[in-house]
Image: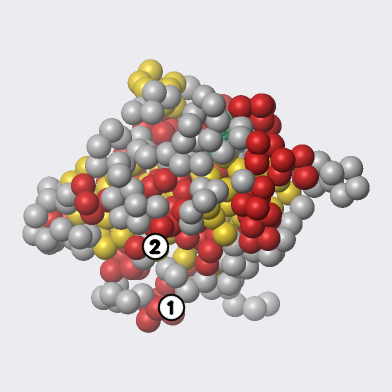
Amino acid sequence: MAKLTTLEEFIVDRQQEFPYASGELSGLLSSIVLASKVVNREINKAGLVDITGSAGEENVQGEEQQKLDVYANEKFQAALESLGEVCGVASEEDDDFVAFKSKEALNGKYVVLTDPLDGSSNIDVNVSIGTIFSIYRRQSEPGKPAELRDFLQKGTEQIAAGYVIYGSSTMLVYSTGHGVNGFTLDPSLGTYYLSHPDLKTPSNGKIYSINEGNIQLCEKGVQDYVEKCQDEKKPHKARYIGSLVADFHRNLLKGGIYLYPATTKAKNGKLRLLYECNPLAFIAEQAGGRATDGHQRIMEIEPKELHQRTPYFIGSEQMVKDLEACL
Ligand code: AHM
Ligand code: MG
């Protein structure tokens, strides 16, 4: 049997691909990995203990928070704060970014943006959910607290990004800008093993993923594209979980397009540029795919605010280009 590579071994092996001090990346990823295992454990218990259900608070987007969102948010922040390499975190669950205060953290060279538990409305019904993360170099002077500008960077400035999918198995997929690699968690050992080396997405695909309940609220170009996907001569497969990480992950592996367009009710769509769109765009492009708001490459959008939303089209290159041609 071929020797399995653990995530830790892999990170050490590929250290030279990281342009900054060796050890920093492994530290950063290890904290994310550790927090993901803790969150994974709680998610697996979600049906057993009374941890699911609403925490009774609304997040900044006006959506009801699930208890596990709050839990995941705390775990990821605590893991990153204790590391010392990170000076601050911005999370979809918090109104504002958090600037860490400890002496080590003040000198931290990185910031992390995260959606700690995406698709959390699916927890109660045992559907896959995910964690999305994005890592940037800070812009402000080390030794002082992190500033807003550290977080408002274009997606092209990401130095690493990834996601964890809590699915039928738990996987961590990440990139540092040298391709994409996927790792599957062996829950009995608590170890991630390399399972999807150098992931490439098919340049074309058959799956389209959109909340079609909103189709009448979408612009004509989107309606035209969806109609093409339903062509009776060669119909595509409609697949929509309503859990971005799971929809994205499936399309990445099989070839497909995910669409969350602007609607007459949500003129910038639903998804958040910094916490959801940029990190997955980084992964998609590194795997040979494409991500756009319909007119502009997602990663070139200049962010103006932390919780900015954007229309989002991501997936196989040819499918995204065909969609763009309809707009
Ligand atoms: P969340 O971050 O509040 O969980 O919302 C994001 C989720 C995505 O996971 C998913 O793709 C999308 O919302 C589904 O939205 P809709 O129910 O409008 O189709
Ligand atoms: Mg989300």
Q: Position of residue 212 (x, y in %)?
A: 68, 32
Q: How is the image coloured?
A: secondary structure
Rendered position, 132 above or below 252: above
Residue 12 position (above or below residue 184) = below
Instruction: Determine which quarter of the picture holds residue 279.
Output: bottom left
Label for residue 14? 1
Residue 33 appears at what percent x and percent y? 41, 56
The correct choice, above or below, for 175 with respect to 237 in the image is below
Q: Residue at x 27, y 51 (%)?
A: 151
Marks 1 and 2 sit apart, C-alpha to C-alpha, by 21 Å
**Label 2: few (<14), some or many (≥20) within 10 Å?**
some
Q: The disc labelled 2 sits on which kind of residue?
A: Thr
Secondary structure type for disc 1: loop
> How far across and how far down the image is residue 135, in percent?
34, 58
Relative to 135, residue 64 above or below: above
Query: From this viewpoint, is residue 61 visible?
Result: yes
Q: Residues within 10 Å of mark 1 (few under 14, many from 20)?
A: few
Circle 2 residue: 156
For image coordinates 64% across by 57% down, the residue present is 321
Question: On the rendered structure, is 79 left or right of 128?
Answer: left
Residue at 32% from the left image edge and 77% from the top image edge: 19
Q: Are marks 1 and 2 in contact (CB under 8 Å)?
A: no
Is 34 displayed left or right of 196 in the figure? left
Q: Earlier in the sequence, mark 1 or mark 2?
A: 1
Between marks 1 and 2 in the image, the one whose residue lies nearer the viewer: 2
The answer to which of 325 and 69 lies nearer the viewer is 325
